[in-house]
Amino acid sequence: MLLFYDGTTEAKSALLRCASLSLALSAVVDVVTVVDCIGTGAMTGGMLSEVLVLQLEANARSALKDAIDELGMNGIFARGHLVFGHAADAISQMLELLSADLIVVGHRAKTGFARWYGSRPLHLDLLERLKGAMIVTVTAG
């Protein structure tokens, strides 16, 4: 079972769902956190400094540790993976590498202007690439 975790409210919701599934199925959880320098570079007009990249990596490592610690407190064995790149690409590669048959991701329903502005939701990109099962936990926008 693979959990995409980035520390957001929707990721925390996905973590709770993943924990209950892992306990019910006695499954090991692989947690993947992605450092997306490509998307961040686009948002900063290509002006991505080394300091910013290091901070993005530190934030991702912290979120990954939090997820593994939370799962561990619930008696779940979890392995952590930090990957660089576009989230959908990195997650697809990790699913293939780990031969995971289930992924759990969080999603926040966007409202108002946010529905029209910004990138496509991650789960839609993953739907087009994956061959396994996916659980999407939806939180209020």
Image (spheres, rainbow, N blue to C red):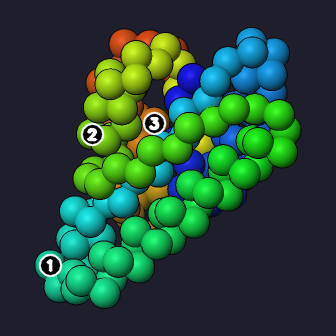
**Badge 2 element:** helix
Say which of 20 and 10 sits in front.
Answer: 20
Which mark, by number, is residue 123? Answer: 3
Query: Between marks 2 and 1, how big is the CA–CA gap?
Result: 20 Å
Of labels 2 and 1, earlier in sequence is 1
The amino acid type of the residue labelled 1 equals Gly
Q: Vertical placement of 27 versus 103: above or below? A: above
Disc sitting over residue 124 in the figure = none
Residue 22 % position (x, y)? 73, 23
**Residue on which disc 2 sits:** 89
Identified by mark 2, the residue type is Asp
Which three-letter amino acid code belongs to the residue tagged 3?
A: His
Question: Which type of secondary structure does the marked residue at label 1 adopt?
Answer: loop
Tell me: 12 left or right of 44.
right
- Crowding at label 1, few (<14), some or many (≥20) Cα neighbours within 10 Å? few
Q: Which quadrant of the figure contains the N terminus?
A: top right
Q: Where is residue 128 in the image (x, y as percent from the top left)?
A: 31, 25
Residue under circle 1?
Answer: 46
Q: Disc 1 versus disc 3: distance between alpha carbons?
A: 26 Å
Residue 81 point in image, percent of width and height = 45, 44
Direction from residue 139 to residue 65 in the image, left or right: left
Q: Is residue 21 visible?
A: no
Please tell me in which quadrant of the rendered image residue 88 appears: top left
Q: Do the residues labelled 3 and 2 touch (CB within 8 Å)?
A: no
Q: Is mark 3 on a helix, strand or loop?
A: helix
